């Protein structure tokens, strides 16, 4: 939940600086205060988890969110007080006061819900959590409400002022470049956490090397073999999920709001991959819990990858707007992208099902999955081409007679394919 709320704060902050065109010293200090408060959210969340019966943790969490909203509101008020700091679209607007009111409403509605959550935390915890979940999905709920309102019967009256209130819609989805930049940052941090765990917890103690292993560093490192195996498997998983994410957005022209939400959910589970590494690296120390640890790791990998596949599905639903022509239905890269994004969900689900049938071999099943998936990525394009060739061969065994109005269809299809972009994935 903390990751999702941080993502909401980041998205609001990004849209906020679409309004602010220039930054002076005061805005820089206010932005620094906002970033400092955001970095406190994980600490307050740790207090919530460690002391679930004490309301102070959730109260401090809500106070941090309220402080973030207050600082963002100060940024808006200060920027509108000095119009030369605003973006050209807002600065030239004839209704800057209405624009400021509209932006402040969008900035403060989340902190207002957290204010209520802080009050409820003192006597009724469930309502506090419900309000914080509402903060996460508030932009999407607001857009759904506007969609329903626009389709109500009856003609809506135009606004009395007859002009635009704000030139930049803060509810629009973020640009593809911003989504990619944020995603790359999450993947980089997750990969860094993996190597930090190796460096911190798996360096042999000199005293143990002398006494337990008779001065043999090789024997001491051999004791940590399962940890290194888990590290390489986890890092390969992070790297290949990032590669699949990069391949997907390579063919995306525009990210919709639904794609942004699904991307956030995918990144939330990607952030759990260090936890999966810690679970799988503990096989040697606690073998009696290995079945539960394997299933937890498979579940994290499955949800991190299935939301990537959901992004692809959401993009296909509006392919003319979101995708390059090469990955439209029937495009040159469509089948390959489908197989690439389906590989990890299928592999993790298969491993999870196999542990239900062969629980005694759960560790071996998980390690086999981690080893075979990278090789499957290397051979994926060849396997997809062989599968498509096989399907074409089977279809050729039962040729269908074309109807009269379909006689010119192959020629039209050839002309359409000639217009596809040949960019490889």
Image: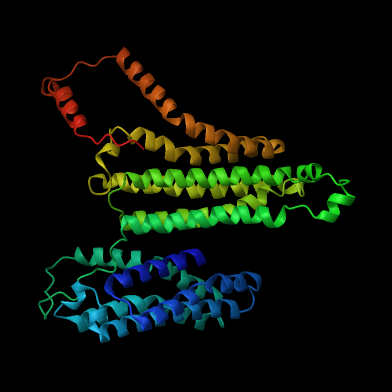
Is there any visible trace of residue 166 in the rendered image?
no
Q: Is residue 233 left or right of residue 409?
A: right
Q: Is residue 314 left or right of residue 115?
A: left
Which quarter of the picture shows residue 151?
Answer: bottom left
Residue at 56% across / 37% down in the picture? Answer: 350
x and y percent of residue 243 in the render? Answer: 45, 44
State the residue in front, 238 or 321: 238
Q: How many marks?
A: 0
Residue farthest toward the top in the current orientation of the protein: 397
Residue at 60% across / 72% down in the picture? Answer: 48
Q: How is the image coloured?
A: rainbow
Q: Is residue 138 above or below residue 184?
A: below
State the residue in front, 23 or 342: 23
Which quarter of the picture shows residue 160?
Answer: bottom left
State the residue in front, 336 or 79: 79
Is there any visible trace of residue 16 in the rendered image?
yes
Q: Is residue 386 above or below residue 201?
A: above
x and y percent of residue 308 in the render? Answer: 42, 47
Q: Is residue 416 left or right of residue 257?
A: left
Q: Is residue 375 above or below residue 393?
A: below
Residue farthest toward the bottom in the current orientation of the protein: 81
x and y percent of residue 24 in the render? Answer: 33, 80
Residue at 64% across / 38% down in the picture? Answer: 367
Q: Is residue 323 left or right of residue 247?
A: left
x and y percent of residue 227 in the render? Answer: 70, 47
* Location of the C terminus (image quadrant): top left
């Amino acid at each position: 939940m903390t990751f999702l709320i941080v993502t909401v704060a980041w998205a609001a902050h990004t849209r906020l600086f679409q309004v602010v065109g220039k930054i002076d010293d005061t805005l820089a200090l206010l932005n620094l205060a906002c970033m400092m408060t955001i970095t406190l959210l994980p600490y307050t969340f740790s207090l919530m988890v460690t002391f679930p019966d004490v309301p102070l943790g959730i109260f401090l969490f809500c106070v941090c969110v309220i402080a973030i909203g207050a600082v963002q509101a100060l940024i808006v008020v200060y920027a509108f007080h000095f119009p030369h700091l605003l973006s050209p679209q807002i600065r030239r607007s004839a209704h800057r006061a209405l624009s400021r009111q509209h932006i402040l409403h969008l900035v403060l509605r989340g902190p207002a819900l957290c204010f209520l959550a802080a009050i409820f935390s003192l006597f009724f915890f469930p309502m506090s959590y419900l309000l914080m979940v509402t903060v996460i999905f508030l932009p999407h709920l607001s857009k759904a409400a506007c969609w329903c309102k626009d389709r109500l019967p009856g003609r809506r009256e135009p606004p009395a002022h007859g002009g635009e209130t704000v030139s930049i819609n803060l509810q629009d989805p973020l640009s593809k470049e911003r989504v990619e930049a944020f995603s790359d940052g999450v993947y980089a941090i997750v990969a860094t956490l993996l190597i930090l765990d190796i460096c911190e917890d798996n360096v042999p103690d000199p005293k143990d090397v002398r006494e337990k292993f008779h001065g043999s560093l090789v024997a001491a490192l051999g004791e940590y073999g399962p940890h290194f195996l888990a590290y390489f498997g986890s890092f390969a998983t992070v790297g290949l999920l990032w590669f699949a994410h990069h391949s997907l957005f390579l063919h995306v022209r525009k990210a919709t709001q639904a794609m942004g939400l699904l991307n956030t959910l995918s990144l939330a589970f990607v952030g759990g991959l260090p936890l999966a590494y810690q679970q799988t690296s503990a096989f040697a120390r606690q073998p009696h819990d290995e079945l539960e640890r394997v299933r937890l790791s498979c579940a994290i990998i499955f949800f991190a990858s299935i939301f990537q596949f959901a992004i692809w599905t959401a993009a296909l639903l509006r392919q003319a707007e979101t995708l390059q022509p090469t990955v439209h239905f029937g495009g040159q890269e469509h089948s390959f992208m489908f197989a690439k994004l389906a590989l990890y969900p299928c592999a993790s689900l298969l491993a999870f099902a196999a542990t239900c049938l062969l629980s005694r071999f759960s560790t071996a099943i998980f390690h086999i999955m981690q080893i075979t998936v990278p090789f499957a990525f290397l051979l994926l394009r060849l396997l997809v081409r062989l599968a498509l060739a096989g399907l074409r061969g089977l279809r050729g065994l039962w040729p269908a007679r074309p109807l009269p109005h379909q006689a010119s269809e192959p020629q039209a299809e050839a002309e359409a394919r000639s217009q596809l972009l040949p960019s490889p994935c």
